[in-house]
Amino acid sequence: MSLKFQSNGNLEVGIHSLSWIDFTSNFGFNEHRKKLIRGLALAIEHLKACGCQILYIDGSFVTQKTNPSDFDACWDRTGINLITMRTLYPTLVDFRNERKNQKDLYMGEIFPMHVVADEYNTFIDFFQLDKDGTSKGIVKLTL
């Protein structure tokens, strides 16, 4: 699937549903990005084990930036077994120290989509705005 980007490098406005193959072919275009994708793949493996069905990806990773520092993601809580998550995959819900443990294990930050990200928006809405408050696109992965 061919994606369209705004002149600033952000995805065109909207939620873009991609398969894992399309996601990796669109965003894994260099070794640095492939390394981040491996971390994301581990996060997806852990989220799926907890019952997660949908994950949204944001941040500079879903732009045309050559070397994004990480990825940002938020998961839909529908079907999630929080006991499994907290017991077997506690890093998924460890938000201490600016999510250091998440960044170390998964190479990105992962939030529940329904949690408030700032004073106005949940993460799913916050992810669809750039730093200036301008609308932008995000990626949806069905797990």
Image (spheres, grey):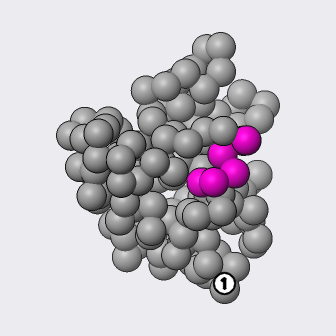
Whether residue 112 is visible to the viewer of this picture, yes or no, is yes
Measured along the vertical axis of the image, is residue 1 above or below residue 59? below
Amino acid type at circle 1 is Asn
Measured along the vertical axis of the image, is residue 59 above or below residue 83? below
**Image quarter (top left, top right, bottom left or bottom right) of the N terminus:** bottom left
Q: Residue at x 29, y 39 (%)?
A: 83
Q: Nearer the viewer, residue 54 or 80?
A: 80
Q: Residue at x 61, y 71 (%)?
A: 36
Measured along the vertical axis of the image, is residue 143 above or below residue 83? below
Q: Horizontal and vertical percent for residue 73? A: 52, 48
Q: Quadrant of residue 116?
A: top right
Q: Nearer the viewer, residue 57 or 100?
A: 100
Q: Number of numbered discs present?
A: 1
Q: Which span is picked out in magenta?
A: 97-102
Q: Is residue 50 left or right of residue 90?
A: left
Q: Horizontal and vertical percent for residue 49? A: 27, 58
Q: Horizontal and vertical percent for residue 18? A: 37, 61
Judging by the rendered image, the residue that carries numbered circle 1 is 30
Q: Is residue 49 left or right of residue 68?
A: left
Q: Horizontal and vertical percent for residue 58? A: 57, 49
Q: Is residue 76 left or right of residue 133?
A: left
**Image quarter (top left, top right, bottom left or bottom right) of the C terminus:** bottom left
Q: Residue at x 60, y 26 (%)?
A: 117
Q: Is residue 2 magenta?
A: no
